[in-house]
Image: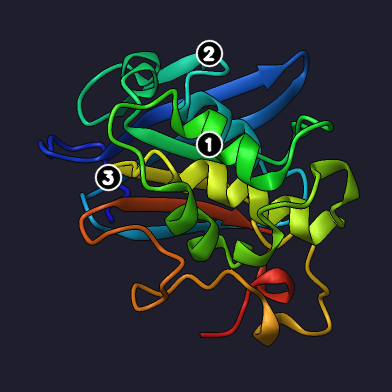
Amino acid sequence: MTTSNSANPGMAVRLDGLVKRYGTIQAVRGIDLDIAPGEVVALLGPNGAGKSTTIDMLLGLARPDEGSASIFGNPPEQVVAQGLVGAMLQSGSLLPDVTVGEIVAMFAALHRKPLSVGEALERAGIADLAKRRTAKLSGGQAQRVRFALAVVPDPDLLVLDEPTRTSSPRAPSRCWWRPRRSSSSLPRAGCSHMSTCRGRSGWPRP
């Protein structure tokens, strides 16, 4: 990972001078960031630091007021449309009248070369919940389903916005998601991985 805006071809992610304002509030103040293929990068900061806004601009969900974002050298919207990016955002509800297995299968059907439903559920640690309706899930279980939806496309870039937000801050070492390449929950080798977290208190121990 680099934080300079010098030429650096072949980056999975490039944020160049990103600025986002909401009225008089400057949510993001000139971020420069390069992430190489295969890198695992975390953005740490308190609530209101601009982490989610940065993710939104990276994914093409918000337009920067200044600067630019690219994924594999292309506009974010193009790469997302090609199914090369998996994302788990803070917002968004699950369809209430389907099972966990059904919703992952529906999402997998939108992609050309997805993981099997079983593998996606295994990576999220919810294989035993495949037949449970999403309306019956706890907050932590629903978060794991969102993770399964993010990895089922077998993406080249995985983006997680505060994946630990529903975990107990008193027991971070027991968190289901861990930012380690050796973890079976992470995607295949070569996949770049960017996530956000609310500082050390919410970050799982290695």
Mark 1: few, some, or many residues within 10 Å (few <14, many ≥20)?
some
Q: Amino acid at mark 1?
A: Ala
Residue 124 appears in which quarter of the rendering? bottom right
Identified at 53% across, 36% down, the residue is 105
Q: Amino acid at mark 3?
A: Ser
Identified at 41% across, 63% down, the residue is 186
| Residue situated in front as seen by the camera: 84 or 131 | 131
Q: Determine which residue is flagged by label 1.
A: 105
Residue 115, which numbered label?
none
Is 138 situated above or below 27? below
Could you say where residue 99 lies in the image, as x and y percent from the top left?
73, 42
Disc 3 and disc 2: Cα gap in Å? 21 Å
Could you say where residue 134 lies in the image, as x and y percent from the top left?
80, 43
Q: Determine which residue is flagged by label 2.
A: 63
Mark 2: few, some, or many residues within 10 Å (few <14, many ≥20)?
some
Disc 3 and disc 1: Cα gap in Å? 40 Å
Furthest-front residue in view?
131
Could you say where residue 153 lies in the image, as x and y percent from the top left?
39, 38
Q: Determine which residue is flagged by label 3.
A: 4
